[in-house]
Amino acid sequence: MILFSKKVFSLLYILIFILSFTSHANDGYNLWLQYKKVENKQLLKNYMASIQGVESSGDSKTISVAKQELEKGFSGLFGNVFQIDDNNSGKNTLIIGSEANLDVKYSKYLKNELSKIERDGFIIKQLKIEGNTKIIITAKTDVGVLYGVFRLLREIQSYKSIENINIIDSPKVDVRILNHWDNLDRTVERGYAGFSLWDWHRLPDYIDSRYVDYARANASIGINGTVLTNVNANALILTPHYLEKVKALADVFRPYGLKVYLTARFSAPIEIGGLETADPLNTEVIQWWKDKTAEIYKSIPDFGGYLVKANSEGQPGPQNYERNHVDGANMLADAVAPFGGIVMWRAFVYSEHDPTDRAKQAYSEFVPYDGQFKDNILIQVKNGAIDFQPREPFHPMFGAMPKTPLMMEFQITQEYLGFSTHLVYLPKLYEEVFEADTYREGKGSTVAKVIDGSLHNKKITGVAGVTNIGNDRNWTGHHFLQANWYGFGRLAWNPHLKSKDIAEEWIRQTFSNDENFINPIKKMMIQSRETVVKYMNPYGLHHIFDTGHHYGPGPWVGNLPRPEWNPTYYHKADEFGVGFNRTKTGSNATAQYAPEVAKMYDDILTTPEKDLLWFHHVSWNHKLKNEQTLWNGMALKYQEGVDEVEDMISLWNSMEQYVDPQRFKEVKMMLNIQYKEAKWWRDACLLYFQQFSKQDLPNGVEKPSKTLEEFQSLRFPFAPGR
């Protein structure tokens, strides 16, 4: 018998009290995998009646983590400790297992469904067998089973009925991948949520539990790949010292279906291989890459392949040796092909030697090579032709290379969208791009059909997202920006999904199932991207950000050594108007689109006003569709953006009863920062452009708080993400 003194008992009581109090705090670490107890008593009763036990088949590590996830999820959702005992299941049972391992007494009922799913797809179906209810989760692979497990948990978290559940779902895209722009010193280029997750110094012997939670989160939304290192690559990642560390991460990620990829610095044969050249047609270089790739696959058998940034922004590439992108990409493709690997070759290229229009350069460099790339190469194309702007027309390369797989590159991190302090729901942007019609095979040839391979019957497809993840406790720096990671994964799985439906999924899992919270917050999220466009880049203005860090406005910057680095290059404001003429009377960038699209953009009257200044240099007195002049319309748009952030603050303040105190307070502080910075954008930009329009601000627009000179004097030498 153990006796406690009064002093010890008092300390225990205090500890229990503290733990019970702090258990209500929520720092956002659990993302959308909150697994809070179901509050609807009737639903809870139904869920628990439907799932009284779990049977699993298969003994892989993936099936093991699927069982762990079910135990964790059901324990939280049902409010009781839920343990899986394969030998002692209830009558109403959840059964998980791949097609190969599933008991024939169950699989015989699912032959029709099994014929409909593809690799990574899954089935969740309720059956009546021998008088008992069985919910079956099965797939072609164990990873598919894991995806099905997460889907079932999502249904329960979202308070959806699972009675007669019948879900058949397969991803429409093969490679669904995050690009980490993480450096080996743990800084993150364009990272606004702390330092890199990867603690290279302690790896491979110290495995942070966060690596597992990262893999769980990605598996829950169907992401199946991760590029660990910056596209501005460091060749050291390919040395044995670092490959041992990469292997440790790959081993953690493997049960979750998450493959590891690396960036390949094109000059690596010189920098770490001791060769005198990196010429892709040199036999020694070719052999060096083959040997290095074999070395990687020996320790990481499921290594995914390489991501390459070449001959862009000073990065080395095949053009250094008077070769072309085909020569460089095909050389690496041959190295990974025997192992089933792929090469993702980025199309983000532009040169200071082209005086006409940076927007045209990627198309000009890649489209002529259509059909010459190896079958295991994906050309990775940014959603727009410039650089992840708050709004860009879709990239003209989409649909223009019918013989070459193109993969989408979105930016999840908010390099040009206020960093992690601004609430911007980016799936709305992704949806806008996917729904854009290229007209390459007639009306209805959407970008989504290019990316999922259906437009030109592509054998391999992909979507990449430059991640917004760091080592902040809430992962993304702002609680609402978790929705961008979540939404990217959902749209990478299926580019035809609607952003409003994804927003509701995320809200229900992350915050609340109360309709009084869901409906207004969903509306706020859907509007938020348009709000930021209004107070930063209305009517097609673009790339007017301050130099280097891209934090805040800098439309006045015009002294940088390369013309296309300067905001003045893009807006071309003068006394006659503002905007970049990309029509057939200007740079003729419109000619890179299908004729139907080019015709629309060439005419100022048919160009959508959201893209007006992207394609036209427009008079300050041009009449907009709302009868306002361009100058008045711009000023009023900037003001609308500011007003809408103020509305977001008011809405959030009214939602306090639905949100835990910590997250409520932290989001409130972020919204206040956003409001302050939205006013900064409005005032600085209108003062600058007013020099050219020479017109007063219209009624309804607040007067600037500082002079233009004061705004121009601001400096941010330590802005994050440089």
Image (tube, rainbow, N blue to C red):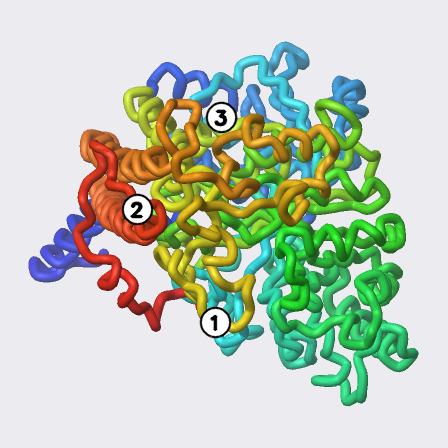
- N-terminal label among 1 and 2: 1
Nearer the observer: mark 1 or 2; the answer is 2
Q: Is residue 601 left or right of residue 375?
A: left
Q: Nearer the viewer, residue 88 or 35?
A: 35
Q: Position of residue 208 (x, y in %)?
A: 48, 64
Amino acid carrying label 2: it is Lys
| Secondary structure of the residue carrying numbered label 1 | loop
- Which residue is at 46% across, 58% downward? 567
Q: Nearer the viewer, mark 2 or mark 3?
A: 2
**Disc 3 or 1, which lies upstream in sequence?**
1
Left or right? Give the position of 280 relative to 103.
Answer: right
**Camera-nearest residue between 185 and 527:** 527
Q: In the figure, residue 191 lies in which quadrant?
A: bottom left
User: Residue 212 placed where, x, y %?
Assistant: 52, 55
**Residue sitting at x 69%, y 58%:** 346
Mark 2 or mark 3, earlier in chain: 3
Most distant residue in the left direction: 6
**Which residue carries the number 1 mark?**
186
Direction top: furthest residue: 131
Name the residue beneath numbered marker 3: 501
Q: Residues within 10 Å of mark 1 (few under 14, many from 20)?
A: some
Q: Is residue 263 visible?
A: no
Residue drawn at x 44%, y 45% as measured from the top left: 576
What is the secondary structure assignment of the residue under circle 2? loop
Q: What residue is pinned by disc 2?
A: 694
